[in-house]
Amino acid sequence: MKTTGVIAQIFFFVLLLVEAGCEPPQVGPGRIEPPPIADNDCNEVSTYARYAPVKIDIVPLTEFTRVSNASEESKIKVYVSLLDPFGSEIKSPGIFRFELYARVPRSAEPKGRRITIWPDIDLTDVVENNRYWQDFLRAYEFSLPFELETNQSRILQVTCLCPNGKRLSAEFVLTHTK
C-alpha cells in the first residue's frame, strides 16, 4: 500500500509540473509583451562605419629617389595604405599630412627636429582620391619633392585626418642609399 501512495504522489507531482510549465504565457491585461523582432532595418551610415580606417601603414617601398637629370629634383616616394578593423587595405577619403624629421641615433626619442612639412593633400574629392590610388598595391602613392643634403637617416611621419574625426598616424625610417 505504501508503494501505491508513493507512486500516486510522484504521478501527481509530474502532472503538476507538466501543467504549470508547458504552456506559453497568454497575452492579456497586465501582461508584458516581448519586443517585436526587428525587420533587419539597416542604417547605411552605421553599416559602413565598421569599414572606416582604423590604422595607417607606410609601405616599405617608400624611399628617396635621386634623379640624375638636372631639370628634375629628387623626391621621396611614399606609399601609404589605410587599414580597416579587419586588417584589409581600403580606399577612403581623408586629408594627408607629411612631415620629415631628423633622426637622432642612440636616443630614447629618435625623432629629432622637424626638417620639412609639406602642404596637406586633400583626398576627400573622388577625382583627387583616384589620382593617388594605386589599385595593384592597394595603397596611395605620393611623390614629395625633397633635396637630400647628407647621407643621414630621416623619420617620415604621415598623418591622415579621416572624415569621422579620427587622426591616424605612422612613422617610417628613411635611410639614404647610394
Image (cartoon, rainbow, N blue to C red):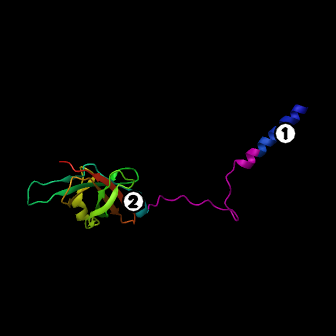
Find residue 67 and report its image quarter.
bottom left
Q: Residues within 10 Å of mark 2 (few under 14, many from 20)?
A: few
Q: Say which of 85 and 151 sits in front.
A: 151
| Amino acid carrying mark 2 in the image | Tyr
Rendered image: mark on residue 90: none
| Amino acid carrying mark 1 in the image | Gln
Q: Residue pushed farthest right?
A: 1
Q: Is residue 169 magenta?
A: no
Q: Position of residue 151 (x, y in %)?
A: 21, 52
Quadrant of the snapshot with the N terminus: top right
Q: Residue visible at 68% across and 55% down?
A: 25
Q: Position of residue 157 (x, y in %)?
A: 31, 58
Q: Position of residue 155 (x, y in %)?
A: 30, 56
Q: Residue pushed farthest front?
A: 106
Q: Is residue 71 left or right of residue 124?
A: left
Could you tell me which secondary element the residue under label 1 belongs to? helix
Q: Say which of 4 and 117 sits in front.
A: 117
As measured in the structure, the alpha-carbon distance from the residue carrying label 1 to the one carrying label 2 is 62 Å
Give the prevailing secondary structure in the magenta stretch. Answer: loop
Q: Residue visible at 33% across and 61% down?
A: 159
- According to the picture, the residue beneath numbered tag 1 turns out to be 9
Q: Is residue 69 left or right of residue 81?
A: left
- Counting residues from the N terminus, which is met first, the one under dot 1 or under dot 2? 1
Q: Nearer the viewer, mark 1 or mark 2?
A: 2
Could you tell me which secondary element the residue under label 2 belongs to? helix
Q: Is residue 45 visible?
A: yes
The stretch in magenta equals 17-42
Rendered image: mark on residue 48: 2
Q: Residue visible at 41% across and 60% down?
A: 49
